[in-house]
């Protein structure tokens, strides 16, 4: 799992790339990196909560 600082640096690098290197829209690429970071963070939190709590409680 990548740390917050690494993901932040990747997002900043993608955002700061010239438009010709970043593809169609450099903001979309940066938002993609940020959304991946948020998804990874949410998954990490859910996994941590499941490990700390009774797993039967979270089963449907």
Image (cartoon, helix red, strand yellow):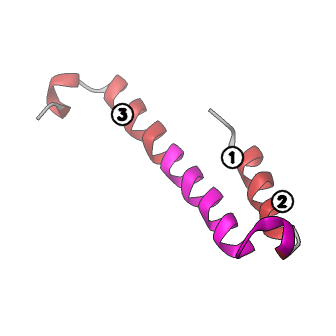
Of badges 3 and 1, the one in the foreground is 1
- Residue under pointer 2: 13
Label the magenta part by its dominant secondary structure: helix
Q: Is residue 40 left or right of residue 51?
A: right
- Residue under pointer 3: 49
* Residue 2 x, y percent position in the rendering: 67, 37
**Residue 27: mark:** none
- Residue under pointer 1: 4
* Residue 27 x, y percent position in the rendering: 69, 74
User: Which of the two labelled residues, at mark 3 and mark 1, occupies the earlier sequence position?
Assistant: 1
* Residue 21 x, y percent position in the rendering: 85, 66
Question: Is residue 60 placed above or below 7 in the rendered structure?
Answer: above
What residue do we see at 79% from left, 62% from top? 14
Mark-to-mark CA distance, 2 and 1: 14 Å
Task: Let me know if residue 27 is in the magenta part.
Answer: yes
What residue do we see at 48% from left, 37% from top? 44
Q: Quadrant of residue 12?
A: bottom right
Mark 1 residue element: helix
Question: Is residue 56 placed above or below 60 in the rendered structure?
Answer: above
Mark-to-mark CA distance, 3 and 1: 19 Å
Q: What's the magenta region? A: 20-41
């Amino acid at each position: 799992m990548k740390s917050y600082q690494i993901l932040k640096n990747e997002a900043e690098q993608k955002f700061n790339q010239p438009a010709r290197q970043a593809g169609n829209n450099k903001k979309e690429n940066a938002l993609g990196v940020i959304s991946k970071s948020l998804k990874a963070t949410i998954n990490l939190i859910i996994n941590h909560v499941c490990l700390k709590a009774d797993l039967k409680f979270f089963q449907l």
